[in-house]
Each structure stands twice: as structure tokens, then as C-alpha cells.
Image (tube, rainbow, N blue to C red):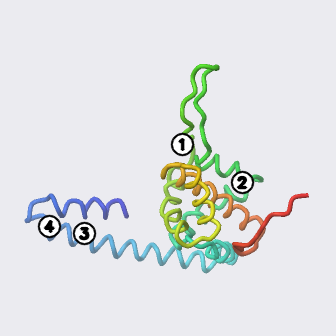
């Protein structure tokens, strides 16, 4: 529905004036339906104790908002089934894919993009917000920037970082702690 709304909004600037009232009416209808759907999703999450608990855990991560939480909870089984965060990263399609052929051809690494494209797209806006408000991500962003990494590489790396954080929080059942340092034996 959101993509339909975007299409209608784009038509407003290009369609004939005679079509404009109908487009505005359709946009209003879509806005109403989108709001109803958001309320249904929120009601479903609030009505299910397990999903509500996971929503509260995810909500503790700076940069992760209601739309992202709903998308993650819609795909919660992948987080449940995987025993390692790197498997979730690969499932979403955020793993680097190196292009190598023998010893002579070495291309730039790129995202694998074999994976859950919709979930991958879901992480874009949270990255932009996290760069401003999440202390863990801010430090990570500064480290990558100081190494001379470009914007797209940084965004993809932060997407992976967020997936790692989300995986850890869902597996541990503990709220986000920006001061958490893992203790390795």
C-alpha cells in the first residue's frame, strides 16, 4: 500500500489537472488503510506476550523504530532458527561477496544480495538514525570514516552491525546496553 501511495503522489505532479482530485481522494483512502494496518500490527504485537517482550527489547536499541520492529518481528523465525549472527546476516543478504578468479582477477567486494531483499531494505533508515543517536554505531561509523571507507560501504557495515546487535539482544533477552563489552574466555 505504501508503494501505491508513492505512485499516486508521483502522479500528482505529472497527471492532468482533471485527474488530480481523484488522485488526492485515492491518497487519502490509502493513508487511512495504512493507518488501520499499522494499528492492526501494533494490536497483534501487544496482544502476544512473546512478541511484546521482543518489541520492548528491540525498542531499547537507539535507531530502531516501530516500523523496523514490526518488520523484524514479521521475520522473527529466522532469528530463532539461526544459532549464529553471521547466518542471519547471510540470510538477509548483507554478507560481503568477494569477486576472485585465480590469482589475476580480484574485483571489489560487494554485498551478496542473495537473501531477503525486503528485510535488507528495512535496515536502511535505521542506519541513518543510528549514526546520529546510537553510541555504539556512532563509534563504529567514526572508525570506518577514519579508515577512508565510502558512504555505501559504511551503511552496509552498519546494517550488519545492527543485525548483530539485534541478534544478540533477542538471544540474550537483555535490553540494549551501549557499555556492554563481551567477555571472551
Identified at 31% across, 64% down, the residue is 5
Q: Nearer the viewer, mark 4 or mark 3?
A: 4
Contact, CB < 8 Å: mark 4 with mark 2? no
Q: Secondary structure at mark 2?
A: helix
From the viewer's perspective, tell me whether residue 183 is left or right of residue 171: right
Q: Which residue is mark 4?
A: 20
What kind of element bears circle 4?
A: helix
**Residue at (73% x, 63% y) in the render:** 168
In the image, 93 versus 43, the foreground residue is: 93
Specify few, some or many for label 3: CA neighbours under 10 Å numbering under 14, 14-19, or 20 or more: some
Image coordinates for residue 178, horizontal then vertical, percent: 69, 72
Q: CA distance from mark 4 to mark 3?
A: 10 Å
Quadrant of the drawing holding the C terminus: bottom right
Instruction: Determine whether label 4 and label 3 are within 8 Å by CB.
Output: no
Q: Which residue is mark 2?
A: 85
Say few, some or many: other residues with alpha carbon within 10 Å of mark 1 (under 14 / 14 to 19 / 20 or more). some
* Residue 26: mark in rendering: 3
Picture mark count: 4
**Which one is earlier in the sequence, the residue at label 4 or at label 1?**
4
Q: Distance of mark 4 from mark 2, alpha carbons?
A: 48 Å
Q: Secondary structure at mark 1?
A: loop
The residue tagged 1 is: 113
Q: CA distance from mark 1 to mark 2?
A: 17 Å
- Indicate which disc, 4 or 3, sits on the residue closer to the N terminus: 4
Q: Position of residue 109 (x, y in %)?
A: 57, 37
Spatial separation of the CA atoms under disc 1 and disc 3 = 34 Å
Amino acid at each position: 500500500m505504501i508503494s501505491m501511495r508513492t505512485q499516486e503522489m508521483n502522479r500528482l505532479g505529472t497527471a492532468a489537472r482533471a485527474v488530480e482530485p481523484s488522485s488526492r481522494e485515492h491518497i487519502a483512502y490509502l493513508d487511512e488503510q495504512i493507518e488501520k494496518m499499522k494499528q492492526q500490527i501494533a494490536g497483534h504485537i501487544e496482544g502476544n506476550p512473546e512478541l511484546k517482550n521482543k518489541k520492548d527489547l528491540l525498542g531499547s536499541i537507539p535507531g530502531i523504530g516501530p516500523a523496523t520492529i514490526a518488520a523484524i518481528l514479521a521475520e522473527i523465525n529466522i532469528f530463532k532458527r539461526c544459532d549464529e549472527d553471521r547466518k542471519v546476516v547471510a540470510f538477509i543478504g548483507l554478507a560481503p561477496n568477494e569477486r576472485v578468479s585465480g590469482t589475476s582477477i580480484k574485483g571489489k567486494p560487494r554485498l551478496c544480495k542473495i537473501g531477503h531483499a525486503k528485510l535488507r531494505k528495512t535496515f536502511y533508515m535505521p542506519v541513518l538514525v543510528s549514526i546520529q543517536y546510537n553510541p555504539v554505531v556512532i563509534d563504529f561509523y567514526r572508525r570506518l570514516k577514519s579508515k577512508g571507507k565510502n558512504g555505501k560501504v559504511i551503511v552496509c557495515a552498519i546494517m550488519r552491525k545492527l543485525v548483530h546487535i539485534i541478534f544478540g539482544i533477542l538471544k540474550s533477552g537483555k535490553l540494549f546496553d551501549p557499555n556492554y563489552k563481551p567477555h571472551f574466555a
